[in-house]
Image (cartoon, coloured by chain):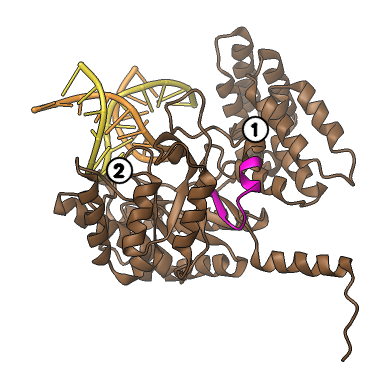
Chain colours: A brown, B yellow, C orange
Amino acid sequence: MHHPKISGRNLSCIFTLLMMCYYSQMIGYACLALGVPGSNLKTTILKHATQERLYALIGLNLAALEVLLDYNIKNGIRLFRISSDLIPFGSSAAKSLPWRTHFAEALGQIGGKIRSSGMRVSMHPGQYTVLNALDPEVAKSAVLDLDYHCQVLDAMGLGPEHKLILHLGGAYGDSDAAKARFVSRWRDLNPAVQNRLVIENDDRIFTIRDVLDVSLRAGIPVVFDNLHNAVNPANPCQADLDWIREAAGTWKGYVGRQKIHYSQQDPGKRPGAHSPTIRVGPFLQYQEALGDVDIMLEVKDKNLSAIKCINCTSNRGIAALEVEWSRYKYAILERDANAYQAIRRLLKDKEAYPALEMYQLVEQALDKEPTAGSAANAAQHVWGYFKDRADKAEKRRWEAAMRRYQEGSGRLSAVKGVLQRLSMKYGENYLNSGYYFAL
DNA sequence: CACCGTCAAGTCGCA
DNA sequence: TGCGACTTGACGGTG
């Protein structure tokens, strides 16, 4: 029998290919993106939620979601949480609207993009969806809310690997009874909902131990949330990785890949508050040990942190870093001219891939408050895009806002507001898809 | 056009 | 007993 020679190099290539097929950790973000024009969801207040208004909003929101998905695909983001606000009042005022059939085409198209790109999406009913409530009316609304979320994914033609994440609910002074009530209410759920449901530890009532207990009794996969566990620990001595390994067992035999929620504490805020951005250094330390687990980031700067973490965990080429730099540059110039120059130098070597170094310089710079001088300098650079196009009224508005800012009587946000309106009006895509207006 | 109170959900903790 | 925090940005009315 003839055996082809397999060199070490070939073996490692084969290994890499296998890893790409079977081991592809995804990193994603939740609900909304910064610096993506046309991706904002709209809603209304209940008082004004007429049928017509709801239809109009749903149409707009589906279009916005498609913009977001296109953006995700283009940027290599393959894990995403769809906002519950997609269908405003989806479990109450819009419940009787036949939005599934009315928007069947858009929903199908969205689902097609998700499937063909290999993206995995989820939805996450919030803290007000309390399945284990003592009040049966509250529990009934929770069921309706879960049905609504499930219907969104169903209507997109997405399989049960696209999950619904839920907290256990309230304790009502008797945590064991509350957990038992969750299990029994779960048993009564529609199987379509059951197949998608995943449970998560929260930051004040149910720890990861509680959630794993419920999982053992009902057979529900578990999402471990690191910050919730830090704030509301099951056992302060037990390492996150041990919980994550235990949670891994809850996914075996079910459709879907294990996922965790990862966030970092905002140092200036209440325990459990999400940080403005993910610090890439600590993230990498955490991520390295994880193995084949998807990571949903919960962080204020959303897609920015997702792209940062993706770029720092795989080599996507210098061009990917240059794209990022083009988005960050005016936000950096606004705060730190030295960092601006340092990053430009860093990106000169086209053979290198200095992702970590670049993002650490970005983080350093964004930590600084803009000085009046540096902010004005950056604003002048941005004004350069419009100074030859702006009409007289626009020039006046720019000059007035700038003068007031430099005199100390006006805010920087007013100056940037003028620039942003110009950028929208003139369709200056380079600025619209950058982070200068968002950070 | 900038500003800010309000919204929508339910539980829990603290006066 | 009742109210504020939590979460979230955007709505929508005011000046």
Seen as rendered, the residue at the extreme bottom is A1
> Looking at the figure, which quarter contains the N terminus of chain A?
bottom right
Residue type highlighted by circle 1: Tyr
Q: Foreground: A276 or A382?
A: A276
Residue A121 image position (x, y, % from top left): 50, 59
| Residue A425 found in image quarter | top right
- Relative to A274, A232 lies left or right: left
Alpha carbons under labels 2 and 1: distance apart = 31 Å
Q: Are marks 2 and 1 in contact (CB under 8 Å)?
A: no
Residue A290 image position (x, y, % from top left): 60, 51
- Relative to A128, A292 lies left or right: right
Q: Foreground: A282 or A304?
A: A282
> Looking at the figure, which quarter contains the C terminus of chain A?
top right
- Relative to A47, A377 lies left or right: right
| Residue B13 found in image quarter | top left
Q: Foreground: A316 or A438?
A: A316
* Residue that label 2 marks: A45
How many residues crowd mark 1 within 10 Å: few (<14), some (14–19), many (20+)?
A: many
Q: Foreground: A155 or A212?
A: A212
Give me the chain letter of mark 2. A
Residue A166 seen by the camera:
no
Which stretch did the figure color magenta?
A285-296
- Relative to A77, C3 lies left or right: left
| Residue A236 found in image quarter | top left
Please report the residue visible at 40 percent of the width from the left and 52 percent of the height from the top: A124
Secondary structure at badge 1 equals loop
Residue type highlighted by circle 2: Ile
